[in-house]
Amino acid sequence: MKDALALYRRYVALSLRAQLVYRATFVMKTLGHLFVTGIEFFGIWALFARFGTLGGWSLREVALIYGIADIAFAITDGTGRGFDKFGSILKAGDFDRMLLRPRSPELQLLGYELQLMRIGRLAQGLAVLVWAGVAIAWTPATVLLLLAAIIGTACTFFGLVVLQATTAFWTIETLEVWNAFTYGGNYAAEYPMAIYRRWFQRFFTAVIPLALTSYYPARAILGRDTLGAIHVLGPLAGVAFLVISLAVFRIGVRHHASTGT
Amino acid sequence: MQIVVEDLAKTFRVAERTAGLAGAVRGLVRRKHREVAALAGVSFSLAAGELVGYIGPNGAGKSTTIKVLAGILVPSSGRVEVAGRVPWKQRIEHVRRIGVVFGQRTQLWWDLPVVESLDMLRHIYKVPADRFRTQREELIELLDLAGILATPVRQLSLGQRMRADLAASLVHAPEILFLDEPTIGLDAVSKLAVRAFVKRLNRERGVTVILTTHDMDDIEALCDRVIVIDGGKIVSDGTLGALRNTVTRERWLTVDVAGDASEVGDADATVIRREGERVCLAFDPEVVSPAELIRRVTSRHAVRDLFVENPPIETVIARIYQR
Amino acid sequence: MMGYAAIIAARFKALLQYRAAALGGLFTQIFFGLVRVMILRAFYAAATTAAPMSLPSVTGYVWLGQAMLLLIPWREDTDVAEQIRTGTVVYELTKPIDLWGVWFARSLAWRTAPVFLRMIPMFVFAMLILPAVAPGWGLAPPPSAAAFALWIGCFAGAVMVSAALTALINVSMMWTLTGEGVPMLLAAFATMFGGLVIPLPLFPDWLKPALYALPFAGILDFPSRVFTGNLSIAEGGLVLAHQLAWTLALAAAGRYFLARGLRRLVVQGG
């Protein structure tokens, strides 16, 4: 495990070096990404300027929820490139090359082309979160809960990308359907889950646990709920989701070994 | 025996697609499959330190065999043992002892200098620091990499990249090396360098080498033993000398004449192909030398261009198969 | 004309082969559309003052945005970008063609086929399926036949503006090192100021004059509001004028900078 972490650190360093070769481009891309992702919150601000409230939620409250969702997604988006582009990796024959190395393919995919420019999304999410945070009375418990929420939500998003990659073993084209759950999930998670229809909320609780990993913890942090088990266990659901996804990916790897896709 | 292959068989299920717009729409609803036997009972054994050519026409089953031996493809049936292991069952230990070079695709990191790729591979393979240093120095010297160590891989010429890929495949000092089309697209000088290196690696270090190639010159330069596969079955397995007798005796002379080629021919040659102004003649160089045949043809006809070549490997294989 | 039809037919066939991607893309858009509608409904539920657009209009607006999503100039023409990157674009000077015109025509072709392929199922979903399942959640038909006819005209205008913008992005490739920054930024502007994030009328009033002046408003916002009846027939005529003016302005800018860019390349030697 320690050895795997050491290798991952080397992959990160390698990716950084490769991307910083073109420094100007990197800066432009990051700023561009910050702007592209930031306009969403600009839209939210504009709507609040006109309507004043969203189903009883204030702009600052929505900002907290938005911040958690976007920071988590930026983490996944930045580290999950290998799984996101798995369709092309398979097609190019580069996955076979990974299998020829004495390491787990998942670790190699995790270390594949880290996307540094996603810091753009992270930065605007963090800025929004900090702005929301100054209006909150933090306790050690809620700070930890915030971290857990971000990690748990990131795990959920990562699990989705892993499942997306797994389908590439069976279909030649990477299924765009998954964008509905990754990008769509991120979009939906930027707003309080309560505003959505009940079937939608149930889906994002029981199937893709975004409500558990980000919305319920946010409610506790905002003081709308008293801190209870569901808030603490929520983020764990995200971790479990990721573990299950990786197991499914393993099945895909075995299938690939039999069919040599 | 280091490598044992017994009755290796592999069948694939392939989806069928009908052409045209109607076919594409039909493909939306239902897909038909058919079974393709890529390998239909392949058997051979290799001792440690052998340098073997594994050749055959496209689609014969070469890559399928290599993938099984490399441990990344599970066969439908049959027994395979490499250095005492079943490749696909003990992937990580097995893969630690082999090196693979694909001529068409590099394993190096595209935007970074060669030396960084080698360093990264050292950590991936967990090679101890001192062993890596000696190994790296040797490879730099043997493959003449000193000049390109700091060059990003995307800036390398094909010949340089192949040398770098060879080094990359040997960072962990494997016992067995699989080379898939290592000289494809290379200039003559690079081809010689690659062949010299592989020969040295095999003779001096005792690395077992399995070479798949379409280049008969590679085979002639390197291989003591040649295994020929066609249609998923071994059709020939023996020394190069034996194969040579069925191959290098025949030569083909292709001639472009000014005008009608229908009359071009010779008593000592058979016409393989005649198209407009081009004729291809097959002849036995022991019956009539290439120079003599050329002299005869050019004296009788107005020749605009000509070349002499070995028959393509497909013809060779077909001949062998017909025996 | 025949060539153009052949191109479209080829695109359709290619798109059918990527059936999973096509259906997947449609699913994703329906998902986004539903989420957007739910968010807007939640905002409107608490509205105390009347908004510039009614909820049914704004709901229809969301679906129109999804239907015409591919009208947005998302990215540069990759073939042209490659030509510029490698410098082979100068060879185009040896041909008796109007290069900007070719780029413009290419963008038109690239916009039209995929847009139709996505529009038709989206319209079916938003106008037929969704209202049957969830009344008030879908796209209502235009208020009059005249409005519909006007919308078709605005649609054509939107395609032109978008194609002109894409051609301009192509030209900008000549000045940027790698194309990453500019197309992304322009796509972001087009998304935001085209009304894809939120309908333009819902922006604060002090921002509106600037927003309405930009070309992006003519790509999605104006045509959509003609369809929903939020803009009257008379205002719809102004939309056409707005689109035409911007197409011409972008064309002029594109042609000017292309000429300069090519001269620069020729002088530099590619």
Image: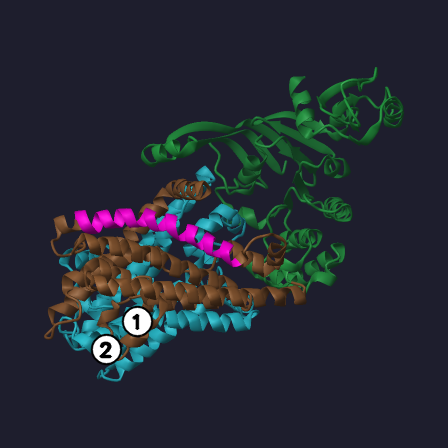
Chain colours: A cyan, B green, C brown
Question: Along the horizontal axis of the image, is B135 left or right of A47?
Answer: right
Q: Which mark is residue C205?
A: 2
Secondary-structure class at tag 1 = helix
Name the quarter where the N terminus of chain A is drawn: bottom left
Residue A66, image x and y in percent?
Answer: 27, 71
Question: Along the horizontal axis of the image, is A56 left or right of A116?
Answer: left
For the residue carrying disc 1, how many other residues have a C-alpha within 10 Å: few (<14), some (14-19), or many (20+)?
A: some
Badge 1 is on which residue? C212
Q: Main secondary structure of the magenta part?
A: helix
Q: Chain of mark 2?
A: C
As drawn, C159 above or below B255: below
At x 19% / y 76%, what residue is drawn? A50
Q: Which mark is residue B296?
A: none
Residue A254, image x and y in percent?
Answer: 42, 43
Secondary-structure class at tag 2 = loop
As drawn, C104 above or below B252: below
- In magenta, the rendered stretch is C100-129
Residue B49, image x and y in percent?
Answer: 70, 41
Name the residue furthest left: C48
Res B173 seen here:
yes
Residue B50, image x and y in percent?
Answer: 70, 38
At x 56% / y 32%, what residue is drawn? B61
The front one of C88 and C218 is C218
